[in-house]
Every structure is written in C-alpha cells, then in structure tokens.
Image: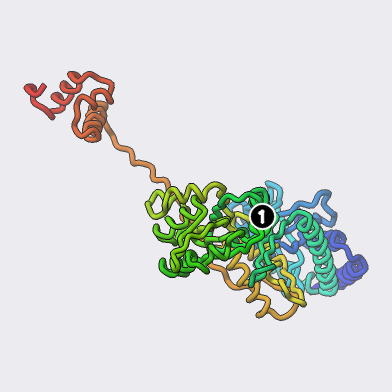
Amino acid sequence: MKTASIQNELATLSTVLLSNLDEVVFFSKLSGFVQGQMNEHKVLGFEVLSDGCTRLIAENGHAVDAAQVLNKGQGLSGYVARMKKAYYSNSVKRDPIASTGLRDEKVEAELCLPIMFEGSVIGTINVQSIKKDRQFTESDMAVINDILNQLQSPIRNMHLYLMAKNLNRELLQRIEAKEKELSNRVEIQVTKGFEDNSQMIGLSKNFLEIVQTAKKIASQDFPVLLEGQHGVGKKILAKKIHAWSGRKGSVVVASCSAMSEAQLDREIFSSKGLLVQANGGTLIIDDIGCTSHHIQTKLLRALVAGEMITVDTEEKVALNVRMIATSKISLKQMVEAGSFKEDLYYRLNTVALRIPSLRERHEDIKVMAELFLNNGKSEKKILTSGAIEKLTSYFWPGNGHELKNIMERTYILTDGQYIEASHLPEFAQEVKVEKVEVKPSYQEFTLFDLEKKHIIDTLDHLSGNKTRAAKALGITVKTLYNKLHSYGLIDAREQ
C-alpha cells in the first residue's frame, strides 16, 4: 500500500507533467520520482523514436547534456521497446541482452520497464544498481508499474504530443527530400506514338550517367546496344534515344523472343515489314540474343550494305534505318559460346550501354514506387516510411516491371490515403550464398618426402618429360635422375 504522502507526490507529479508538454521535462521529472522511490545508483529515462531507436534524455531527475541515441533493438531500452514488456538482469556483464547499452562499468544489475499507452511504447525507465548483492524481482517491477499506472493521463498526453511531433518531423523531411528529388531527378517519358505511357525515372548516379550518355549519342546514326536484366527499361530508353535523335521516320519494335525464325524473317524483311516501316527512322531489335544465325546474317547485311532483299517479292530495298538492339543476355558471352555472330556483335557494339538493375539503383526505388503508385490517378496515395523501408530492402529480381505491377495492385487493394508496410505483399528473402574458405588441413612431411612429392607432381604435370621437369625444378637432368633413383622410381641402368 502506498502512503498518503506518496499518493500526494504522485498527484503533484501528474499535475506538473500535464502542465508541461515537453519530453525533456516529462522524462526528467519521471526519472527523478522513480529514483526517489528506488534509491539506486541511477534511473535513466529513454524516449523511443519513430524508427525504433531509443534516445537517452534524462538521468536521476535531470536532463542529459547531450542526448545519446541507441540503434533499434540495442541495449535494454531497445529490447524492451521492441518486446513491449519489462526485463531485468541481475548480471548485466554476462547477459547478452544487457551487454550493450548505456551504463557505468560498476553497474551490476538493471531493471527496465516500458512507458506505454494503448500498446504504443513512448519510452523506457531504466533502474541501475551497483550493489553486488542487489537482485531485482517482480516486486520491483510492480512498484514502478504502479507509479506508471497512476500517471496514465500525462503518459497519454505525451504519447499524443510525440506522435504529432514525429509526424511533423517526418513531413518536413519528406518536403526536403521531395524538393531535393525534384531538383536532381531525371524522368524519361515516352508517350507520343506509342500505346503505353512508358516511363523511367531516377536520381541515382549510375542512372543519370546512362541518360547523359544516351543523350550524347542520340544524334549519331551508328547502332546502339542496350544490355541489362529483364524489366530495367531497355526498350523505353531505346524509344527515347529515337525521340532525342531527331530522325523523322517511325520507330518500330521487333520482339525477337515472341516469334519463330520464319515469323521473324517475314516480320522484319518482307516488303511491308519492320525494316521498311522504319526506313528513315529506328528499328528496335528487342532481345536480339534470341535470333538465329540466319536472321543475324540478314541484319548484318542491312547494317553494312544499307539494303535488303525482301522475302516475299525478292526486291532490293535501300535502307536508311538506325538499329538499336536490346539483350538480357551478354552478347559477348554468346559470341564466345558460338551462338551469336561475332561480326554482328562488333557492329552493334559501336556504343554499348548497360542499364543497371533496380538493386544497383537503390535510391531510385522510392521515386519509382511513388510514380507507379499514383501515375494517372486523380486521388493520390502516400507511402509511409515503413512501406518505403520494406520496398527498399527487397532485391527486385523483376526490376521496374515487378515494382510497377506491385504498386498498381497495392493502389487497388488498399483503402484510405496511406500505404503501410502491411499493405504490401510479403517479399521473398534473397538467398545469400556465403563462400566458406576451407583451409587445407596440416600434414606432417619430412623435407625428403616433401621434395619427393613435388618432383613427382611436376613430372605428372609435364606428362613424364624429364628434360622439361628438370628445367621447371631448376636442376640438371642428371640430378633429377639421381633423385628418382634414390626414391626407387628408376633403375640405375636407366640413367
């Protein structure tokens, strides 16, 4: 039972906390009151930040001079904030959970309780003892819990205040980030003349370098090779290169992976085929690595001679076509494997650009997600920081295509304006294969045995050629024969 005196002190504390909406005052006054009740070495007050980190604000009733921040889950304050339940350790130096944190070297035991309102942890109270025989128990937890229960009104007010403060801080950060993003980002949009509203967007260094190079080479008529994983935007960039080029003719796409050799032959080389349609303009050969040697030979002739023989009318047609080829597979590797014509590869490789994958453009995920989420929508939705963290931690094997599909699906399935992490699908975790270095086990050898093994290995490597083996070993042939004789590997008469 609490005495009337303690009840009066709690009532006074509650009034003070309610009249001072300031986290420094709140944690300072609270830690001072608990210190008065527990009479231990230190009582610390930690604020739990919106990202899960904890910040030391108060110690024994006083504000700390320079607030120290612990990473999410670090120390007892981080553990208790994450688990939302009290924890005590009577051997902090040997307890792995308590091994990190903010405490003096002489602290022996520590008790930590969450300061909560309706399931949300706004801070922790940490009681530290330097007494060798001090053993915190459930009764100590009950004493502090009783204090916190009597202070639910000021705790509620502080909870609402911190929520508003964190939201305001987050909004300011978003405004600053958006201003920076708008000033730095480059958006590639292809709309006119195409059935889709294709877009690429980014502000990462490697993305901007690709765009800058593409703009430089756009006005030239030589072929371009764009390589990169599925979904990185090769076709979009190819169309944009045509738009930047100033060529007056049409841009058309040959989808090589979707057709057989015969179909592709007719599609490209007929009298009304894609090369004729692209005359004066650009032909994008999408997935050129899927073509046969027959198609590759005909494309090479069109590039070198600037003409073709149509497959249906057998007429010779003069061509003024710029070719931009795309490939998910390394054409150089295909050349080495014999599945792609080397001379065509070198013609296309006049300018080769590799478009980085989304995992290589980590800082672009947020801006791309926001673009895909609200593109063409009248009612805009907002990604929360938790949703952005979930998106940026995924490795995106399907790149921009996968991100676009997920954002469009999330928009449809989510009610309300805000997209939380829980609204996004559960992403598969990337399997990381760790290379384990296996050290060769030690074996005992005499110098005689080691020399013998090395000589025999050298002979095996050189197919038994003793002259070459002697040269490799740095000895004369006669010395080699003598050693082999001493090992019992040849007779004396063989020397």
Rendering quarter of residue 170: bottom right
404, above or below 469, in the image: below
Q: Residue at x 74, y 62 (%)?
A: 48
Label 1 sits on a secondary structure element that is helix
Question: Is residue 47 visible in the rendered structure shown here?
Answer: yes
Q: Label 1: which residue?
A: 245
Q: Nearer the viewer, residue 30 or 73?
A: 73
Quadrant assignment for the N terminus: bottom right
What residue appears at the point 65 percent right and 52 percent down from the top-left corner?
218
Q: Nearer the viewer, residue 256 or 45?
A: 256
Q: Is residue 147 left or right of residue 14?
A: left
Give x and y (percent) for residue 371: 70, 67
Residue 430, image x, y percentages? 52, 61
Q: Quadrant of residue 190?
A: bottom right
The amino acid type of the residue labelled 1 equals Ser
Residue drawn where x is 80% and y is 54% of the image: 59
Indicate whether 265 appears above or below 319.
Answer: below
Where's residue 212, x and y in %? 68, 50
The image quadrant that residue 7 belongs to is bottom right
The answer to whether 380 is drawn above or below residue 385 in the figure is below
Residue sitting nearer the eye, 211 or 62: 211
- 309 relative position to 194: left or right: left
Q: Give percent across and percent down for residue 376.
A: 72, 74
Query: Which quarter of the image is occupied by the C terminus?
Result: top left
